[in-house]
Amino acid sequence: MLKAVCVAIFAALGSWGAREAFAGSADSRVRVNGVQFELRALVLAGDPEPLAQRLDGRWGALQPLPQGSARQVLGRQRGPFHETLTLSAGPRPGFSRVIVAVHDLRQASVPMPSPPLPLPAGARLLNVVQFADSADAAAAWTIEVPGAAGAVLERLRIAAAARGWRQLAAPSIPEAASKGFWAQRGGRELTVVALPSTGRARLVLLEARGAAAALPPAAAP
């Protein structure tokens, strides 16, 4: 299915947009809030906005996004398949990073996995992303919590230790999100990172087998 979708994209671009393979562009499957998507990552020659304008009406329809969004999103419906194309700035000037996502509407959603740690009072679960089909697959939970990030992280550290997680060095994360911790338990790894937010702490909890850094590259459609 993904191959056919990508062929249709290239056909819609014609000779206007040359293409090259994106490193690690093997097909992958993710579940977002219990809904399964098939994904493929590509790199296309051209900047996101002109590529999106070229594809609008030829492959799908441009979707409305907040003003100033750095992404361009197109969508279309073919029978039971809902297909989404997300374009953002590429690995170098003049190229776009592309995520193609296909959702088969005939597939029922599945229950979402519980977070690996109890969430603080007032926490709001924003989304859950699972990176494979297995029930034991890597998963990431994004939550918003009232209060300062440092205090929330300290409560989560205590909760992790009480559940047998052995805390290690802080993860390597961007300066703007410099708060977090990393822990191991058995063959699992847990990374907790605080992201910049206003008035509330936004956290990502990532639980994976082995090295968390080895997760496949994927983006929520």
Image: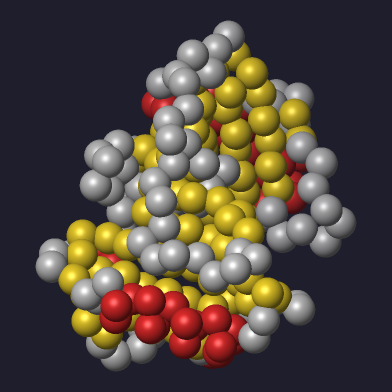
Horizontal side of 31 relative to 152 (left or right) equals left
Name the colouring of the figure.
secondary structure
Q: Quadrant of residue 30?
A: top left
The residue located at (55%, 12%) in the rendering is: 80
Residue 185: % across, % down: 18, 71
Quadrant containing the N terminus is top left
191 or 18, which lies in front? Answer: 191
Residue farthest toward the right in the current orientation of the protein: 67
Horizontal side of 9 relative to 30 (left or right) equals right
The residue located at (25%, 39%) in the rendering is: 134
For residue 4, say whether it is visible.
Answer: no
Residue 151: % across, % down: 56, 88
Give the answer, above or below, for where 62 lies relative to 118.
above
Give the answer, above or below, for where 30 lies relative to 185.
above
Q: How many callouts does the rendering have?
A: 0
The residue located at (37%, 38%) in the rendering is: 29
Residue farthest toward the top in the current orientation of the protein: 79
Give the answer, above or below, for where 74 lies relative to 156.
above
Horizontal side of 18 relative to 70 (left or right) equals left
Quadrant containing the C terminus is top right
The residue located at (57%, 27%) in the rendering is: 83
172 or 137, which lies in front? Answer: 137
Residue 140: % across, % down: 43, 58
Residue 53: % across, % down: 76, 39
For residue 131, say whether it is visible.
Answer: yes
Q: Quadrant of residue 202?
A: bottom right
111 or 140, which lies in front? Answer: 111
